[in-house]
Image (tube, rainbow, N blue to C red):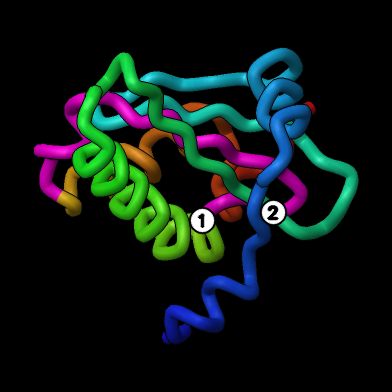
Amino acid sequence: MHTTREKMTMIGRLQKRPEFLRAAKEGKYWVSTGFILQAVPNNSKQSRFGLTITKKVYKQAVKRNRIRRRMRSLAYDILPSAAKDGYDYVLIGKAATLERPYKDLTNDLTWCLKKMNLRKDDPPQQ
């Protein structure tokens, strides 16, 4: 089992706006109850993730920040062990992300990865 610090070094972060725009334009996406997942291949062996939550979802920064913290924890818990390497993942928060139980959010993320054929144990696409 990896510690939180080890998980943080196993997966990188998207931080620049063009990286997010590239995921939206060129990538594929899947909508779940708790959030939207976008994925686009990158040209490295390491996976990276980014988070976004808009004011349209919640006007209050406190609630947006809580959603952001929950999605960050979700990404660090699930993506290093379950998601294919070499992809950029963007998690887009929804209003349901705040109230949805964490276990359901983890199920949503693994379900999205399965539907997009991006789990580590999935066979390669032809």
Amino acid type at mark 1: Leu
- Name the amino acid, label 2: Ser
Q: Is residue 16 left or right of residue 117?
A: right
Quarter assignment of residue 118? top right
Q: Which residues are magenta?
A: 83-101
Image quarter of the C terminus: top right
From the viewer's side, name the closer residue of 41 and 97: 97
The answer to whether 7 is drawn above or below residue 118 in the figure is below
Residue 71 screen position, x and y as percent: 36, 48
Identify the mark nearer the N-term, 1 or 2: 2
Which residue is denoted by mark 2 in the rendering?
47
Residue 121 on the magenta span: no
Callout 1 secondary element: helix
Where residue 124 sits: x, y (%)? 72, 40
Which residue is at 77% across, 28% downward? 18
Q: At 51% across and 82% down in the image, what residue appears?
A: 5
| Residue 79: image tag | 1
Residue 14 horizontal side relative to residue 45, left or right: left
